[in-house]
Amino acid sequence: MPPEDYILRMEGIHKHFGGVHALRGVDLFLRRGEVLAIVGENGAGKSTLVEVLCGNLRPDAGRIIYEGRPVHFAGAMEAAFAGISVVHQELSLVPELSVAENIFCAREPTIPILGFVDRRRLYREAAEMLRRFDLDIPPSTPVRRLPVAIQQMIEIAKALSLDCRVLVLDEPTSTLTEHEIRYLFDIIARLKARGVAVIYISHRIAEVFEIADRIMVLRDGEHVGTRAKDEVTPDDVVRMMVGRALGTGYPQRGGLAGEVVLRVEGLTREPRFRNISFELRAGEILGVAGLVGAGRTEIARAIFGIDRPQAGAIYLDGKKIQVRDPGHAIRLGIGYVPEDRKEQGLFLGLAVRTNIGAASLQANAVLGFMSPSREQRMAEEYVNRLRIRAPSVLTTVSHLSGGNQQKVLLAKWLAIRPRVLIVDEPTRGVDVGAKAEVHSILRELARAGTAVMMISSELPEILGASDRILVIHEGEASGLLSADEATEEKIMFLAAGRGAAAAC
Ligand SMILES: Nc1ncnc2c1ncn2[C@@H]1O[C@H](COP(=O)(O)OP(=O)(O)OP(=O)(O)O)[C@@H](O)[C@H]1O
Ligand SMILES: [Mg+2]
């Protein structure tokens, strides 16, 4: 293909972070109107490549040719004005600003001559944009009030509001549900038809095979190869990613569940959820399914003592408890891995080791101390098991790739082996190999007697990893299924609120 048919070429890109050689001579060629997927394990260099492209990071070597000319963008804003829009892996919205202000950030429509921001037009255009995404929210809502998935949709809307020729999506679907993913794919197809080129980063291989024309594989900062979709199978791609074949199955279920550890009765916190009752037994994994916004995270937050329920009761080992705050929950033996690692989960400025040790420290507050050597051993054990890619356990967490941060967060909770562990989207952004490891660790914890509640928007994960499945629809329990009777269709049906209220 003659070079002018490529809208974008990145050639021989190198990037170091101190001793870490994150990109080792990577080439990327992007054609007009194609979807190029980039896949690779956590820490392979995908996001770094994107940041180099949009000018947020300066490469140590290599060049970028866009529309036939060498370019050096000073930052994402400049790249956006040139027609390259990026939806970053970490959300970059300003929480205090409204949805409309975020969408049109720094490009608000102004009243001619006067130069004031034309608020009416701003809200009208934002409302139009939101309608295109099926989002029923007033454009004046502050972003911080919205769930992560909706924020993600707004990020995408923001990128599309710029008239882009190249759209880069770094893990856009990790927070989205099936319905929203369909919608996004629809938009991508329309953009393609208009000649827009899309770079699509994802850990969901099935999704990549659905949407991409070509698949580029990175491993340890090296470009392993780029293949047309029709030339390879998903197994080939996984092998290229991890350098070995991987079993894809879920661990065997645990057999009989034990005594009831956690019982929730009539839990209510309007307007998010009401009259929620369920039991969680030692040794079981209870999957919690539902659409984004159904109230699943809010239920978890109430159990963990972040929000106070208005009505209802929680029993732990048969005794009624009133969880005052998260610290209290931890001392009672309840752990919670939140969906939003940046907001609630990690001390980004501290070392991997300190983060992994943090919850154990709190759980053993009587002693208030853990020997450095014990903390070191524990951290090393989890770094190995979860294949956390970090130069050492002393590395600051903010220097890790998104997926590796997620693994550190999980490790922190797995390490204390609580009586009850609530995990919210535990494998979001985690690569295929580590995903299987997370599932096997959850199963192992359950076997050792922990009662696990797993909130997930990924139906295959819900079906593969749970013993029973609780489905939430608009803040109410709409069904409870055993693993044997559950199917994707049944869950979707209940999640959409179309089932008869089942016995919960
Ligand atoms: N600011 C930084 N300082 C130090 N090291 C960094 C920094 N940003 C990235 N790295 C390192 O560069 C490597 C590549 O990271 P990158 O974020 O590109 O991975 P990724 O492929 O996007 O992974 P993920 O799937 O987890 O998002 C990792 O080893 C990471 O720890
Ligand atoms: Mg990344």
Image (cartoon, rainbow, N blue to C red):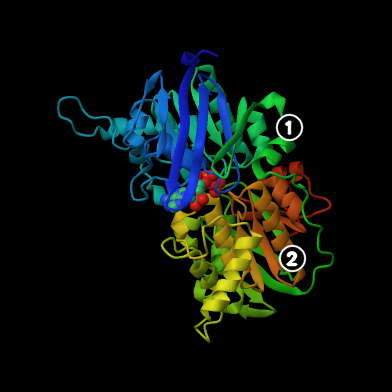
Find disc 1 in the rendering and name its residue.
233
Q: Who is closer to the viewer here, 101 or 229? A: 229
Q: Residues within 10 Å of mark 2 (few under 14, many from 20)?
A: some
> Image height check: is 10 above or below 299?
above
> Image height check: is 428 above or below 78?
below
Amino acid beneath label 1: Thr
Quadrant including the N terminus: top right
Q: Residues within 10 Å of mark 1 (few under 14, many from 20)?
A: few
Q: Who is closer to the viewer here, 179 or 428? A: 428
Q: Residue at x 52, y 70 (%)?
A: 305
Residue 189: x percent and y percent?
57, 23
Left or right: residue 274 compared with residue 92 = right
- Residue 104 shows up from this direction: no
Q: Residue at x 52, y 25 (%)?
A: 29
Residue 10: x percent and y percent?
46, 29
Q: Earlier in the sequence, mark 2 or mark 1?
A: 1
Q: CA distance from mark 2 to mark 1?
A: 31 Å
Quadrant including the C terminus: bottom right
- Report the disc number at residue 444: 2
Q: Residue at x 31, y 35 (%)?
A: 74
Residue 394: x percent and y percent?
48, 65
> Image height check: is 288 above or below 77?
below
Left or right: residue 302 compared with residue 52 = right
* Secondary structure of the residue carrying numbered label 1: loop
